Amino acid sequence: MTKYRHFKLRHQMHKGYENGLRTNSLRAFTLIELLVVISIISILIAILLPALRAAREQSKTLSCLSNMKQIGLCFTMYQTNFREFFPPPTINAPTTQNAGGKLYWIDLMKPYVNDHTPVANVDNYLWFNNASPNPTVFQCPSLRLEQCNRTAFSGMGYNNYGLSNGLWSDLHVRLLDIRRPTDLMVVADANELAPYQGASGINTGDKIDFRHSKSATNMLYADGHCKTIRDDVVKVGWSNFYRKYPYMEDWK
């Protein structure tokens, strides 16, 4: 009887030892499996991140294009009210508190984006970011925050090349006066090199900013259509040692 108990005890100990080995083996296998899963997830993330980033940038490009379209609608409503004339890049308005006693084209668009803030109470340089209830229409989603807060920088520029012979004046152009409205760029993404020009107008090709994915810019044309154009398909007007500058169509 004593030998039987001793044998049974040894058998139970051996069985427990085998169970322990089996349990440890299962735990080790589970850990390896977890590491494999983590590795696979890491590889998938590395593959998907560029695609997600590209999709996000494409979304910003489309949002900017939508803003351009809304600006085009503002132009259309302005033309309806003012006998087909395009808004001038600037007009003299000595009674306002804006810089230099002038109103700029974005000031003239205010009523069409449901902004009825009195012009005399708005600083033109900061209107785009602070004073307007709907400033994003004139701001590109691809702009960085520090660019949006910069004085007089909206991210979209008005083509005033040839509109007033290079001068800031009160000259006007009608849609009927333009021979090729489908080819004339009116508004485009403006860069940060000259914030004043970026907010008010584009009078040289270097002010166009190809800030979107694949070096593209959004443009609004005189006939109201908008499209995204890459820098390698834009006509080149002139170049220097550093870069090529887009060709600017004048108002004719």
Image (spheres, grey):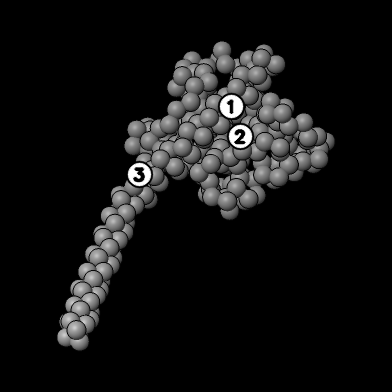
Tell me whether the residue at label 3 lies in contact with that at label 1, contact meaning CB atoms closer than 8 angstroms. no
Quadrant into which the N terminus falls: bottom left
* C-alpha separation, residue under disc 3 versus residue under disc 1: 29 Å
* C-alpha separation, residue under disc 2 versus residue under disc 3: 27 Å
Q: Secondary structure at mark 3?
A: helix
Q: Which residue is mark 3?
A: 51
Residue 14, image x and y in percent?
19, 78
Q: Residues within 10 Å of mark 1 (few under 14, many from 20)?
A: some
Residue 155 appears left or right of 36? right
Residue 190, image x and y in percent?
52, 40
Residue 222 appears left or right of 234? right
Tell me whether the residue at label 2 lies in contact with that at label 1, contact meaning CB atoms closer than 8 angstroms. yes
The amino acid beneath tag 2 is Val
Q: Nearer the viewer, residue 68 or 30?
A: 30
Q: How many marks?
A: 3
Q: Nearer the viewer, residue 233 or 197?
A: 233
Residue 31 appears left or right of 190? left
Looking at the picture, does residue 45 appear above or below residue 24? above
Residue 72, image x and y in percent?
57, 24
Residue at x-position 26% and y-position 60%: 33
Looking at the picture, does residue 11 appear above or below residue 218? below
Residue at x-position 56% and y-position 36%: 157
Residue 218, image x and y in percent?
47, 33
Residue 16 showing in the rendered view: yes
Tell me which numbered mark, 2 or 1, is placed earlier along the sequence.
1
The amino acid beneath tag 3 is Ala
Tell me which numbered mark, 2 or 3, is placed earlier along the sequence.
3
Tell me which numbered mark, 3 or 1, is placed earlier along the sequence.
3
Q: Nearer the viewer, residue 67 or 249?
A: 67
Q: Which residue is mark 1?
A: 70
Q: Which residue is mark 2?
A: 137
Residue at x-position 21% and y-position 82%: 5
